[in-house]
């Protein structure tokens, strides 16, 4: 078992985590990025010129892994701590695998389904109400305060808890944030949508506004009914292509 | 349009493209931010912010989980702002949307191809990676990021060429009614995508009530204004 420092290069590992998805691929997904971030925490496994334990740990850390990118640090820190604590390799592999689903689900719930759309919708509402640049700047600043804090918390909690990191995931503040995130996002996005609709369609004439309303409702229904084959992009491309053809035939 | 702002747009689009997945995911890739800064580069912040808002609604339709394939709206918004800039009114808006949607499609496809290329690079390096060769690990990772930078630059460049073509060809060919239709179609599709994406996220549970409450509140404020 290697001597465990209090905070062995957490800063370097933290910086590397910003590129954790840099080599995302269909085989190992986040694996390589996780390996790169973990490497900084594993250097203390080198003992008297013997790098076997260090190399084996780096190889393990770079294997298949997937999670929300902001929470990947939790697995990086926890697995690195487990390596230092001398946990058997097969157990470390199982431990990493066990973290994939909870880290993915929690990150998606907290960030992709709540924090990000909530702030984006608030910025849209701000723009519609005339805040312009201030709304955009506020979005970037506030979002990244949460983003950076979450990444740092994940890495330091992983390192602090090691194999017992599941306790950190069950923290009351995370559960509360997870519970109120999506309803709050729904409320703010719902508030923003009519304002943005009016703002974007403000320069249109009467019949154009009617067309916007009809196509938006039909498009919404189509996107709900045919989710598997239809997307917002396809709807947009079809709508603008149709508009170009109609405008050409009926100048 | 002179070369200098185009060059700055290319650099900005590349950074935006890198931010989406590779580094640092600070959400400059969000259309709202990408568009506002692109507008600032062109000295037309209002167009940038409005085009950004339009594509932000399209972005709501995307949940980037796992290996899901999705369009890339960041560089697309930069190209869309370039297309809409200097064309007044609804026509600029419509052309911007057209260019942006096509660029978004190309960007999404390029991401998928990049991931396949990176997968092959990882497979080729499997043996040293399993040995724990740190130099190979760092090289494969850094090369993948560099490759994504090149991809983002290429997607932005294609978008900017499309924007130039739209300004010089379509802007002349489209009738006033066609311009109105184009703008209306883009806004309608964006609203459908935005509301559909949100509805999917809130689901049919208690969050739906909050969504409905928000819609009512937004409608009242809009009416009062």
Image: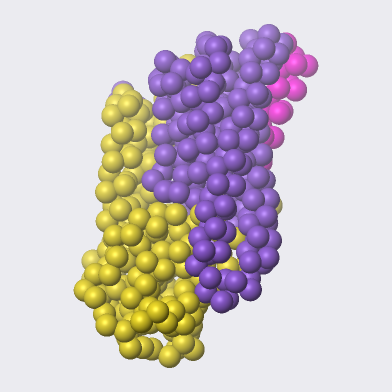
The spot of residue B157 in percent (x, y) is 61, 29
Observer-nearest of B146 and B183: B146
Observer-nearest of A129 and B31: B31
Above-or-below relation of A248 to A11: above
The spot of residue A60 in percent (x, y) is 50, 77
Q: Residue at x 23, y 66 (%)?
A: A173
Q: Quadrant of the C terminus of chain B?
A: top left
The spot of residue B97 in percent (x, y) is 58, 27
Q: Residue at x 55, y 47 (%)?
A: B146
Asked whether residue A240 is in view, the answer is yes
State whether the magenta stretch is mostly helix, strand or loop: helix
Color used for chain B?
purple
Q: Quarter-wise, where is residue B43 in the image?
A: top left
> Which residue is at the far left?
A6
The spot of residue A76 in percent (x, y) is 39, 70
Above-or-below relation of A131 to A219: above
> Left or right of B114: which side holds A58?
left
> Left or right of B159: which side holds A14?
left
Q: Quarter-wise, where is residue A162 in the image?
A: bottom left
The residue range painted magenta reads A233-251
Q: Residue at x 54, y 21 (%)?
A: B6
User: Does residue A239 belong to the magenta stretch?
Assistant: yes
Above-or-below relation of B208 to B131: above
Q: Quadrant of the N terminus of chain B?
A: top right
Above-or-below relation of A251 to B120: above
> Left or right of A16: which side holds B59?
right
Color used for chain A?
yellow
Colour scheme of the picture: by chain
Asked whether residue A222 is in view, the answer is no
């Amino acid at each position: 078992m290697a001597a465990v420092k209090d905070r062995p290069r957490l800063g370097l590992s933290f910086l590397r985590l910003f590129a954790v998805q840099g080599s995302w691929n269909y085989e190992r997904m986040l694996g390589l990025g996780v390996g790169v971030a973990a490497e900084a925490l594993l250097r203390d496994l080198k003992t008297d010129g013997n790098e076997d334990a260090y190399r084996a740990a780096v190889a393990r850390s770079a294997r298949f892994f997937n999670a929300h990118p902001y929470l990947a640090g939790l697995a990086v820190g926890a697995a690195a701590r487990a390596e230092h604590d001398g946990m058997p390799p097969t157990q470390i592999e199982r431990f990493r695998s066990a973290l994939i689903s909870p880290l993915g689900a929690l990150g998606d719930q907290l960030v992709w389904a709540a924090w990000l759309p909530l702030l984006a919708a608030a910025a849209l509402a701000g723009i519609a109400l005339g805040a312009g640049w201030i709304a955009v700047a506020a979005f970037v600043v506030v979002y990244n305060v949460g983003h950076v804090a979450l990444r740092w918390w994940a890495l330091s909690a992983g390192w602090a808890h090691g194999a017992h990191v599941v306790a950190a995931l069950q923290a009351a503040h995370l559960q509360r944030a997870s519970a109120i995130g999506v309803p709050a996002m729904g409320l703010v996005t719902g508030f923003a949508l009519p304002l943005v609709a009016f703002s974007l369609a403000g320069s249109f004439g009467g019949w154009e506004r009617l067309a916007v309303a009809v196509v938006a409702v039909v498009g919404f229904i189509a996107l709900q009914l045919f989710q598997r084959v239809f997307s917002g992009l396809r709807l947009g491309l079809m709508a603008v292509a149709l508009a170009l053809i109609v405008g050409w035939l009926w100048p | 349009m002179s070369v200098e702002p185009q060059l700055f747009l290319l650099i900005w689009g590349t950074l935006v493209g890198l931010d989406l997945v590779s580094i640092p995911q600070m959400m400059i890739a969000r259309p709202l931010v990408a568009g506002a800064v692109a507008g600032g580069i062109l000295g037309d912040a209002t167009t940038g912010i409005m085009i950004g808002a339009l594509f932000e609604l399209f972005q709501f339709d995307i949940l980037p989980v796992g290996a899901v394939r999705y369009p890339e709206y960041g560089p697309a918004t930069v190209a869309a702002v370039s297309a809409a800039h200097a064309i007044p009114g609804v026509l600029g808006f419509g052309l911007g949307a057209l260019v942006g949607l096509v660029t978004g499609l190309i960007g999404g496809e390029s991401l998928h191809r990049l991931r396949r290329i990176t997968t092959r690079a990882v497979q080729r390096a499997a043996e040293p990676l399993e040995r724990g060769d740190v130099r190979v690990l760092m090289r494969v990772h850094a090369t993948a990021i560099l490759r994504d930078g090149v991809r983002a630059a290429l997607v932005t460049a294609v978008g900017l060429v499309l924007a130039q073509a739209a300004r010089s060809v379509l802007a002349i060919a489209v009738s006033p009614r066609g311009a109105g239709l184009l703008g209306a179609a883009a806004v309608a599709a964006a609203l459908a995508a935005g509301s559909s994406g949100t509805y999917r996220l809130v689901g049919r549970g208690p969050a739906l009530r909050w969504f409905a409450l928000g819609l009512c509140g937004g409608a009242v404020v809009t009416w009062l204004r």
